[in-house]
Amino acid sequence: MLHRVSKIRGATVLASDGDVGHVEEFLFEDTTWRIRYLIVNAAGRKVLVSPDLVKRNWGIAGLNVALTRQQVSESPGVDDVDASTTSRVCRTSDVTGDHIQASDGEIGHVDDFLIDEASWTIQYFVVDTSNWIGGKSVLISPTVLKGIDWSNSTLQVSLTREAIKNSPSIDSVTIAPGENTPFIWIM
């Protein structure tokens, strides 16, 4: 099952003995595209939780973790991570909004990510091409990434603009229930 990062942010994190906070962000390896940690806001403290501790069938309704509330609160904080071990770990928010540079020109920007529930890898970038091809969101696999220009917030891909234009749309994949619809506010 695929999950939208934008819809999982804010989801409740449930420890074995109760609610512990909510998902604030995801950290991923920029070479393997595997989610390395969830950043969980646990009573105002941002802690790192390994996705290996998240039980199956997670989604916008919540994520159950194989930890107690105390274990989550004692997890390493975001600022506690040794920089030498995380040099290739990025926040999804660091890439959201970055421009996509095709082999023949700019074509859109990263709007979201689709994460595979079983492998905890980013399977696709959701690319907003509305300024180029009229409002279509397409999917691009991280495997076509040639490089990231962090200073210019640009991802270079090995595809042409035409190939991106003809990439599968967001509607062509199965996304977890409730994650492909806009939020509805009832007042």
Image: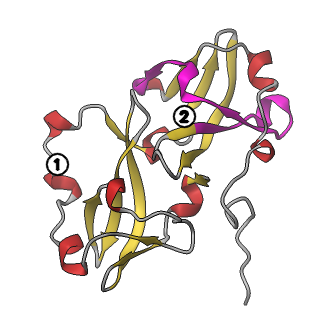
SS for dot 1:
loop
Q: Is residue 119 magenta?
A: no
Q: Earlier in the sequence, mark 2 or mark 1?
A: 1
Tell whether 112 sits left or right of 186. left
Residue stretch in magenta: 124-151
Q: Residue furthest right?
A: 134
Where does residue 108 sit, x and y in percent of width and height?
Answer: 68, 30
In the image, residue 50 above or below residue 165: below
Say few, some or many: other residues with alpha carbon within 10 Å of mark 1 (under 14 / 14 to 19 / 20 or more). Answer: few
Task: Find residue 3 and report its image quarter.
Answer: bottom right
Q: Which mark is residue 3?
A: none
Residue at 30% x, 31% y is 88
- Residue 94 position, x and y percent, is 43, 41
- Mark 1 highlights which residue? 81
Q: Amino acid at mark 2?
A: Asp
Q: Is residue 106 above or below residue 88?
A: above
- The answer to whether 153 appears left or right of 37 in the picture is right
Depth check, front residue: 66 or 146? 66
Q: Looking at the rendering, in which quadrant would you find the C terminus? A: bottom right
Q: Position of residue 83 (x, y in %)?
A: 16, 38
Type of amino acid under label 1: Val
Please state which of the two labelled residues, at mark 2 or mark 1, is closer to the viewer: 1
Secondary structure of the residue carrying tag 2 is loop
- In the picture, measured across the screen, residue 107 lies left or right of residue 70, that is right
| Residue depicted at 73% across the width and 51% down the height | 174
Contact (CB < 8 A) between labels 2 and 1? Answer: no
121 in relation to 42, above or below: above
* Structural distance between the alpha carbons of marks 2 and 1: 25 Å
Q: Tell me the tag on residue 98.
A: 2
